[in-house]
Image: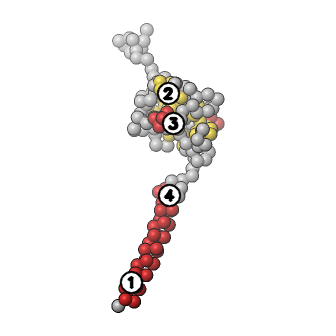
Amino acid sequence: MKDGIVHDLDRRRVLAIVALGALAVVAFLAASPSAGGATRAGATVSLRKTALGMVLVARDGHTLYLFGKDRNDRSACSGSCAHFWPPLLTPSKPIAGPGIKAALLGTTKRSDGKVQVTYAKHPLYTYMLDTRAGQTTGEGLTFFGGVWDALSAKGAAVKKQAPSTSPYGYGH
C-alpha cells in the first residue's frame, strides 16, 4: 500500500511539473509581439474630419496634437505630461494613411529611449480625455508649459475658429 501512495505522489509531481511547463509556454506566447493580432508595423497617421476641420489622427481615429514647448524635433513632454498626453509611439517606420504626406512623417527618440512619431518635425501626441475617434477636446489647452494644437495635413497647428460676431454668420 505504501508503494502505491509513493507512486501516486510521484505521478502528481510529474503532472504538476508538466502543467507548470505548459502554463509557462502559454504565458510566453501570450506576451510575444505577435499575440492577439499585434504586429510590428509602424504607427499609421491619417486625416479625419472633425469639428476643427481635417486633422491628423492615429490608427484608432484619435486626434493627434503638437506641443508648443517641443523644440528641434524633440519631445518636452514626459512623466505626468506623457500620462495625460500619450506620445504616438512606433516600433518601426510610421505609415502615411490617406491624405498624409509621407515626406513629412518621421521619428524622434524620447528621453526613455522609445521612438515617437513626428510630422513636419512635430512630435505627435494623443489626449487622454479624447475618448472617442474624432474628438478634439485637447485643442488650444495650455498645460505643462505649452499650448496643445491639432495638426493639419500641412503640419501646421489647427486653431479653433473664432465665433462670428455677425448675426448673419459671416463676420464684419
Q: Nearer the viewer, residue 24 or 132?
A: 24
Looking at the rendered structure, the secondary structure element under dot 2 is loop
Residue drawn at point x = 51 percent, y = 36 percent = 79
Callout 1, which amino acid? Asp
Circle 4 packing at 10 Å, graded few (<14), some (14-19), many (20+), is few
Residue carrying label 4: 31
Residue drawn at point x = 40 percent, y = 34 percent = 129
Q: How far across and down, in percent of the image, does residue 125 sit?
A: 51, 35
Looking at the rendered structure, the secondary structure element under dot 3 is loop
Q: Is there CB contact under 8 Å for labels 4 and 1?
A: no
101 relative position to 9: left or right: right
139 relative position to 111: left or right: left
Circle 2 packing at 10 Å, graded few (<14), some (14-19), many (20+), is some
Residue drawn at point x = 51 percent, y = 62 percent = 28
Q: CA distance from mark 3 to mark 1?
A: 55 Å
Callout 4, which amino acid? Ala
